[in-house]
């Protein structure tokens, strides 16, 4: 089978730039405000073949160029007879080329100033695939990049192919002198409007919430249409405003919404609106139901949130930014393990975030986000065992590590330089001087980089030594014995304690038993320490509590926090939730009345918490060659679930004290209470067990 091929990583960089240019706000585009790497624009592809018979090939390409077919020949008399000699003939792209038997080489040179240079070669035995070499005329030749989505010459790798589903509104009603269209769920869609003959002008007010759509002054996305005017003449204007398909039928550009309000229009007018929902149809490899309907609803809404935020890349929010953020993506990698287990979206996102070398800026300008990127490489290998990807991306990891190590102080602490965003979370952190939570992430980055080197057979001792020294200095400078916790900053003298650094310390295994107990008492279970208000860091807080066995508290928090959003009418989970915030202000953020994302990737973390901790499904060795299943039976009267374990799946059902488990691949171990049981492939294991768990 032929594949479209390109320079490895450039497909992701190209589409990543398109994605990061996709933000729309109140009638204008807002390209992301950080440095974005360019893809290569001029390439040579080549491969060598030995033909037994004549063959006709055709080369499709995106860009300008030519095909050069070479044949190995006996050197002419004036050449050394042991030198290679190739005759060659150049052909235009897109034409049939007759190739003769013998040793021969196909080269294609393609340049594309505006898009992604790539080729697709089709023949009987001569086909383009990952065995081809590609050269950018500067660095060494490398194996071509490709993926399984583009296998036909008529496809265009510069256009991502989404699944389309046309949806009718679930409800249409007259409200506030206009029509309110409710699609029953949030979608990412082109809006399709059919104008009746007597309706010429309409205004579309979009909303993730009903309140936003009805607010014609402050709604985030609004568009005025005139049915009698021709559509924009292509280019930027069409991309922004949409296009007329036929007379009286108009397609807007892709937007995220649940509601559309059309002020000044009556139901009798006959105005029709549909939603052409665009999405990636990821496989459904997991399921979960239990006897608690609130938890079932949290799972359902989490999965809906996650799927909407998963496309060609993991995005943050689908309405406002539509950008690729490394912190959001890092959590999505874990959630993905318990939903679709899709490796390709992980690779695409990792490559798009990093871009090309040299590193000139932190990912998304955020110091911590560069370190999440490094850590994600080890986590990706744990999930997939894909050392080929690590080998390809290793030079980019090293360049990122070097960039990080260029901004260390005399204690080895990383600090923010001008232009860096020291983020961690939307929280009141004491950021004077170096910040403790950032040092925790740096320590974890050293460990991850050392592990990647080990996997690739490269000495990682340098990083391990840096890790040990940094860990010691973190304890020396940031541990406050009186407070029994890590403080944010030792420079300011305020000795301010927040949850974030302490969560990382325990989660990464940087504390001994006494320190862990102290942090649990003085921070994690201490209501006087400021509460975390974002699902983003609730992810880490609840993970560390679950890892310590506080399952009752984790379950209670999921029901209260995510359930609290459901009580406020959420049908997807939000970027931030403050339970005490008045309802009339609950959609505001960033100084914008509707600035809060109501469908945000990091809001889907209950999937991970349930799969990883309550059902206890985790890899023991990379790619789930061996894996563990350890359900917390004491938390449920009954449950039934299926989760991916690498390329296979594990199914569990628990009811009336009977646990049934079945995996379709070997390598699994069930832990129930104090006992362990081997899971034989395709053989159901039945255990009758008294209810109980290791909870505290």
Image: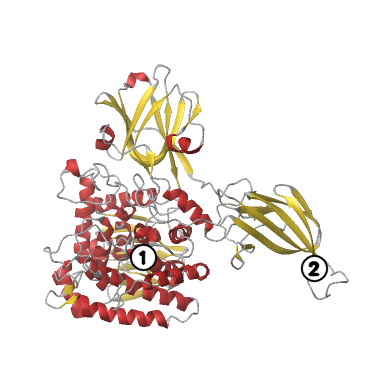
Whether residue 33 sits left or right of residue 536 in the image: it is: right
Lower sequence index among marks 2 and 1: 2
The residue under the point 31% across, 82% down is 469
Which of pointers 2 and 1 indicates the residue nearer the eye?
A: 2
Measuring from the top left, give residue 8's x and y in whole percent: 55, 61
Measuring from the top left, give residue 314's x and y in whole percent: 40, 54
* In the foreground, 217 or 101: 217
* In the foreground, 589 or 609: 589
Label 2 SS: loop
The residue under the point 17% across, 71% down is 520
Label 1 SS: helix
Q: Quadrant of residue 561?
A: bottom left
Whether residue 695 sits left or right of residue 126 in the image: it is: left
The label shown at residue 438 is: none
Measuring from the top left, give residue 618's x and y in whole percent: 37, 68
Q: Which residue is mark 1?
A: 372
Is 478 drawn above or below residue 651 in the view shown?
below
Q: Quadrant of residue 553?
A: bottom left
Whether residue 312 sits left or right of residue 111 in the image: it is: left
Circle 1 packing at 10 Å, graded few (<14), some (14-19), many (20+), is: many
Q: Which residue is mark 2?
A: 85
Is 259 drawn above or below residue 657 in the view shown?
above
Dividing the image into 4 quarters, which one contains the C terminus?
Answer: bottom left
Q: Is residue 548 visible?
A: yes
Circle 2 packing at 10 Å, graded few (<14), some (14-19), many (20+), is: some
The residue under the point 36% across, 59% down is 365
């Amino acid at each position: 089978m032929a594949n479209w091929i390109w320079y490895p990583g450039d497909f992701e960089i190209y589409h990543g730039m398109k994605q990061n240019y996709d933000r729309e706000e109140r009638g204008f585009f807002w390209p992301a405000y950080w440095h974005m790497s360019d893809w290569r624009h001029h390439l040579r592809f080549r491969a060598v073949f030995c033909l037994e018979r004549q063959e006709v090939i055709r080369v499709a390409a995106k860009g300008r160029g030519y095909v050069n077919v070479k044949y190995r020949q006996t050197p002419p008399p004036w050449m050394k007879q042991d030198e290679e000699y190739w005759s060659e003939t150049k052909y235009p792209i897109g034409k049939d080329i007759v190739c003769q038997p013998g040793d021969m080489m196909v080269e294609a040179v393609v340049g594309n100033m505006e898009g992604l240079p790539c080729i697709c070669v089709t023949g009987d035995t001569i086909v383009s695939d990952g065995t081809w070499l590609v050269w950018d005329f500067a660095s060494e030749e490398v194996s071509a990049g490709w993926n399984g989505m583009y296998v036909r010459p008529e496809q265009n790798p510069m256009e991502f192919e989404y699944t389309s589903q046309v949806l009718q509104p679930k409800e249409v009603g007259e409200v506030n002198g206009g029509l309110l269209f409710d699609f029953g769920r949030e979608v990412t869609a082109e809006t399709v409007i059919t104008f009746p003959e007597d309706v010429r002008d309409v205004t579309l007010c979009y909303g993730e919430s009903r309140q936003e759509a009805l607010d014609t002054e402050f709604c985030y996305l609004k568009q005025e249409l005139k049915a009698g005017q021709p559509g924009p003449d292509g280019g930027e204007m069409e991309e922004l405003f949409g296009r007329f398909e036929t007379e009286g039928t108009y397609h807007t550009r892709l937007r995220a919404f649940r509601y559309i309000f059309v002020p000044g229009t009556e139901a009798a007018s006959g105005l029709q609106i549909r939603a052409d929902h665009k999405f990636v149809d990821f496989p459904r490899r997991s399921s979960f139901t239990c006897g608690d309907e609130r938890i079932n609803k949290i799972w359902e809404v989490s999965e809906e949130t996650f799927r909407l935020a998963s496309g060609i890349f993991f995005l943050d929010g689908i309405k406002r930014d539509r950008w690729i953020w490394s912190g959001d993506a890092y959590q999505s990698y874990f959630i993905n393990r318990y939903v679709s287990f899709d490796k390709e979206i992980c690779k695409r996102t990792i490559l798009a975030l990093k871009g090309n070398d040299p590193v000139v800026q932190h990912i998304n300008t955020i110091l911590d986000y560069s370190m999440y990127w490094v850590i994600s490489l080890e986590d990706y290998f744990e999930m997939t065992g894909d050392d080929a990807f690590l080998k390809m991306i290793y030079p980019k990891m090293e360049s990122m590590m070097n960039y990080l190590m260029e901004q260390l102080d005399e204690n080895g602490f990383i600090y923010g330089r001008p232009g860096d965003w020291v983020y961690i979370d939307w929280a009141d952190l004491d950021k004077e001087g170096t910040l403790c939570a950032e040092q925790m992430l740096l320590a974890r980055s050293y460990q991850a980089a050392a592990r990647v080197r080990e996997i690739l057979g490269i000495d990682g001792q340098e990083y391990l030594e840096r890790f040990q020294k940094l860990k010691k200095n973190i304890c020396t400078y940031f541990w406050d014995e009186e407070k029994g916790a890590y403080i944010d900053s030792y420079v300011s003298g305020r000795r301010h304690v927040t949850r974030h650094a302490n969560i990382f310390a325990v989660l990464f295994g940087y504390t001994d038993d006494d320190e862990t107990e102290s942090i649990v008492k003085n921070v994690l279970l201490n209501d006087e320490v400021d509460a975390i208000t974002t699902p983003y860091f609730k992810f880490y807080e609840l993970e560390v509590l679950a890892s310590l066995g506080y399952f009752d508290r984790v379950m209670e928090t999921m029901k209260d926090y995510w359930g609290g959003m459901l009580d406020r009418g959420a049908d997807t989970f939000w970027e931030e939730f403050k339970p005490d915030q008045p309802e009339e202000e609950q959609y505001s953020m960033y100084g914008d009345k509707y600035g809060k994302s109501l469908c945000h990737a990091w809001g889907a973390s209950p999937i991970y918490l349930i799969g990883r901790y309550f059902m206890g499904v985790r890899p023991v060795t990379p790619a789930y060659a061996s894996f563990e299943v350890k359900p917390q039976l004491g938390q449920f009267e009954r449950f039934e679930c299926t989760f991916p374990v690498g390329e296979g799946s594990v199914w569990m059902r628990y009811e009336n004290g009977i646990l049934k488990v079945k995996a379709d691949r070997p390598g699994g171990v069930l832990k129930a209470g104090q006992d362990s049981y081997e899971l034989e492939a395709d053989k159901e294991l039945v255990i009758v067990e008294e209810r109980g768990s290791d909870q505290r």
